[in-house]
Image (cartoon, grey):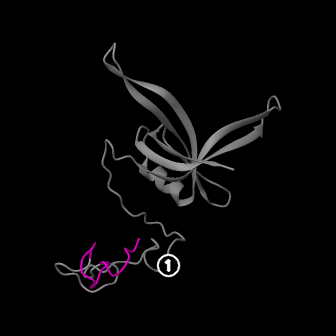
């Protein structure tokens, strides 16, 4: 059984990208989390409860992560599952273990920064013939997802029942 976690912190070092024998990308990196508290005596901010999390990501996520977070210190939000890995120490033969986070989603924190998101150019296995996102492409002239062209007062959220995803239909997501 694994535990899911959401980490809000900073990339602790430059992520390292490697490829396994099957050609699958593997990124290893760390995320440091802490709490900032004001020391009332010195009137300065201090870090408390600092934890370093060993993280790993696979596949296209690993490649996109390494391209996006090329430097340490970037503020991130990561979601994944905590797993224990065990091994035998080569020198002593003793059984050892450590915790790691297998990251399933990661992105920049927008609390103190901005980001411009662009679609990755790699052709993945997701989605059908509609751009790989699994969601239908919206025509620029349509009033929503494949509805009639939208004019003032039609479609959109809560508009008329003509075109788009007004009150007659559910939103497409």
31 lies above or below 158 = above
Q: Is residue 34 magenta?
A: no
Q: Seen from this angle, which residue lies furthest front? A: 167
Q: Which one is nearer the viewer's eye here, 110 or 26? A: 110
Majority SS type along the magenta span: loop
Marker count (numbered) = 1
46 lies above or below 66 = above
Q: Seen from this angle, which residue lies furthest top? A: 41
x and y percent of residue 41 in the render?
Answer: 34, 13
Check the picture and name the quadrant holding the C terminus.
bottom left
x and y percent of residue 138 in the render?
Answer: 33, 78
Q: Determine which residue is flagged by label 1.
A: 128
Decide if residue 70 is in sight here.
no
**Residue drawn at 24 percent across, 77 percent down:** 159
**Residue drawn at 28 percent across, 83 percent down:** 161
132 lies above or below 117 = below
Decide if residue 93 is in sight here.
yes
Q: Which one is nearer the viewer's eye here, 43 or 133? A: 43
Residues drawn in magenta: 156-173
Q: Which one is nearer the viewer's eye here, 102 or 129? A: 102
Snapshot quadrant of residue 88? top right
Snapshot quadrant of residue 52? top right
Question: Which type of secondary structure does the marked residue at label 1 adopt?
Answer: loop
x and y percent of residue 121 in the render?
Answer: 43, 66
Left or right: residue 52 versus residue 115 is right
**Residue drawn at 63 percent across, 60 percent down:** 23
Left or right: residue 98 versus residue 61 is right
């Amino acid at each position: 059984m694994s535990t899911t976690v959401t980490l809000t912190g900073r990339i602790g070092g430059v992520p390292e990208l490697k490829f396994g024998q099957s050609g699958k990308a593997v990124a290893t990196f760390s995320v440091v989390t802490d709490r900032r508290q004001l020391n009332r005596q010195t009137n300065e901010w201090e870090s408390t409860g600092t934890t370093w999390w060993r993280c790993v990501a696979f596949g296209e996520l690993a490649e996109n992560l390494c391209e996006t977070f090329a430097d340490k210190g970037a503020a991130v939000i990561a979601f994944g599952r905590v797993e224990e890995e065990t091994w035998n120490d080569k020198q002593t033969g003793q059984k050892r273990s450590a915790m790691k986070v297998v990251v399933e989603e990661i992105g920049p924190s927008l609390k103190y920064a901005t980001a411009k998101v662009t679609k990755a150019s790699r052709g993945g296995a997701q989605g059908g013939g509609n751009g790989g996102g699994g969601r239908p492409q919206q025509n620029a002239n349509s009033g929503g997802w494949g509805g009639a062209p939208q004019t003032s007062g039609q479609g959109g959220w809560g508009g008329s029942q003509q075109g788009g995803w007004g009150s007659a239909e559910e939103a497409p997501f």
